[in-house]
Amino acid sequence: MALELACGQQGQVHIVAVGGRLDADGAVDLELGLQELEAGGARHFVVDAAGLIYVSSAGLKTLAAFAARVAAQRGSVRLAGVPPALQAAFKEGLPRQIPTYADRSGALAAHPATGLAPDLLQAASRLMGAEAGLPAVAERSELGQAAERLLDAKAVPGQPEVPRPPRARTPLPPSREPERDPEPEPDTGLGGKLRRLLGPKQP
């Protein structure tokens, strides 16, 4: 069974899951994959070994050399999920400086590089009064960490406006003009014609 590689990312941490046999041939494949990530600017890694069924000295040497390169670039490497059958080999073949965790979630938990991108963290640090240079992950100032928490916090939605009932229409004031008697209907009979010809009665 050949080595299987799968890569992912959380924040600035690159997760490299390995499975199958990490023998001499698998060590070459792993080295090529890791170098490609490094060439792309990756500096923080979690190597998830939960899928491994075999590891050789060549594979362990590749991991040790990789961890040394990353440390020289002020990065970090964490190892996670080593199967019980391989724990003795990893313990003997890898330097103790490589932190080891029971699983991937444990390796990612509280990792300082799983949050914001460095450019955002730099901008926040400048706004809060920190120095412009971004220190190494292990040496970040409390101010820089506060800036990360500030930018990483979820925005709290504003309070909604209290709904207001629709305004009742104000009735128009009654007309102040004097009321007029309704005009009598015109008399179309003979008497009405005579009154219209003779005019109104004199008082």
Image: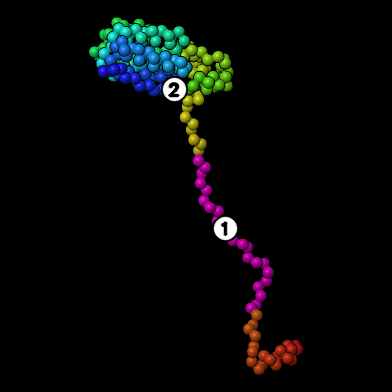
- Looking at the image, which residue is at 41% across and 7% down? 68
Mark 1: amino acid: Arg
Left-right relation of 156 to 183: left
Of residues 34 and 142, the one drawn nearer to the viewer in this rendering: 34
Circle 2 residues within 10 Å: few <14, some 14–19, many ≥20: some
Label 2 belongs to which residue?
11
Q: What residue range appears in magenta?
A: 160-182
* Distance from the alpha carbon under mark 2 to that under mark 1: 58 Å
Of residues 189 and 59, the one drawn nearer to the viewer in this rendering: 59
Q: How many marks?
A: 2
Q: Quadrant of residue 175?
A: bottom right
Of residues 71 and 54, the one drawn nearer to the viewer in this rendering: 54
- In percent of width and height, residue 133 lies at 55, 14
- In percent of width and height, residue 114 lies at 43, 21
Is 169 located above or below residue 103 in the figure?
Answer: below
Please check the rendered image and state whether residue 65 is part of the magenta-colored stretch, yes or no. no
Mark 2: amino acid: Gly
Of callouts 2 and 1, which one flags the residue occurring earlier in the amino acid sequence? 2
Q: Residue furthest right?
A: 202
- In percent of width and height, residue 165 lies at 52, 51
- Looking at the image, which residue is at 51% across and 36% down? 158
Which numbered marker is on residue 151?
Answer: none
Q: Quadrant of residue 37?
A: top left
Label 1 belongs to which residue?
169
